[in-house]
Image: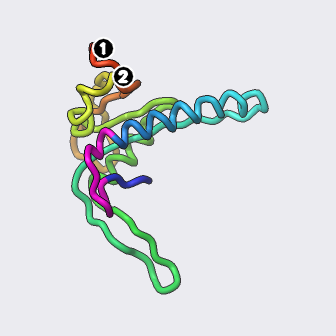
Amino acid sequence: MVFFNDPIPLDQPAQRAVEMALAMRDRVGTLVEGWSRLGHDLGFGVGIAQGFATLGRIGYEGRFDYAAIGTVTNLAARLCGEADAGRVLVSQRVFSAVENLAIGESVGALELKGFSRPIRAFGVSRMINNTAEVRS
């Protein structure tokens, strides 16, 4: 799990998270080809959500971690679980933040464990590099 905008605030955390996820997906894609030739089946899917969480240090003497807990972390984990290899799934809030910067499409409302109603999700395929490009 990766946190954006905490503990150090940054501009456009949703955009940066999506850009990083897409870069990681592309890099892992080249690694998958090599591992596939060796008989290994690897995949890499990402789930991204944005929202409020409880943040802080957790643990016990001798072992401490910095963690986020709450609905937003559960949503990100569930989206990740739904993401097929090579797929970046984002919540509606994240997609709203990047929709003018990215190419993506609705994947519909997903029934996710721990959520009482379906959650709208979007698949992001790439960032727009040229302002002349039009979202599909």
Q: Residues within 10 Å of mark 2 (few under 14, many from 20)?
A: few
Pinpoint residue 97: horizontal percent, then vertical percent: 22, 36
Q: Is residue 11 magenta?
A: yes
- Amino acid at the residue labelled 2: Asn
Rendering quarter of residue 35: top right
Q: Which residue is mark 1?
A: 133
Front one among 105 and 128: 128
- Examine the image and state in which quarter residue 32 appears: top right
> Most prominent secondary structure in the magenta stretch?
loop
Q: Residue furthest right?
A: 38
Task: Say if the magenta span includes residue 7.
Answer: yes
Range drawn in magenta: 5-15
Q: Which residue is mark 2?
A: 129
x 33%, y 42%: residue: 112
Residue at x 44%, y 77% (from the top left corner): 59
- Mark 2 and mark 1: span between their CA atoms? 8 Å
Which element type, helix, strand or loop, lies under badge 2?
loop
Q: Residue at x 40, y 48 (%)?
A: 77
Position of 110 compared to 96: left or right?
right
Badge 1 crowding class, 10 Å Cα cut-off, few under 14, some 14 to 19, many 20 or more, is few
> Which of the pair 46/113 is nearer the observer?
46
Which quadrant would residue 81 be assigned to in this image? top left
- The dot on residue 23 is none
Q: Residue at x 29, y 32 (%)?
A: 121
Q: Quadrant of the C terminus?
A: top left
Label 2 with label 1: CB-CB less than 8 Å: yes
For badge 1, the amino acid type reads Glu
Q: Secondary structure at mark 1?
A: loop
> Residue 84 location, x and y as percent?
48, 31
Horizontal side of 111 relative to 29 (left or right) equals left
Residue 50, relative to residue 119: is it above or below?
Answer: below
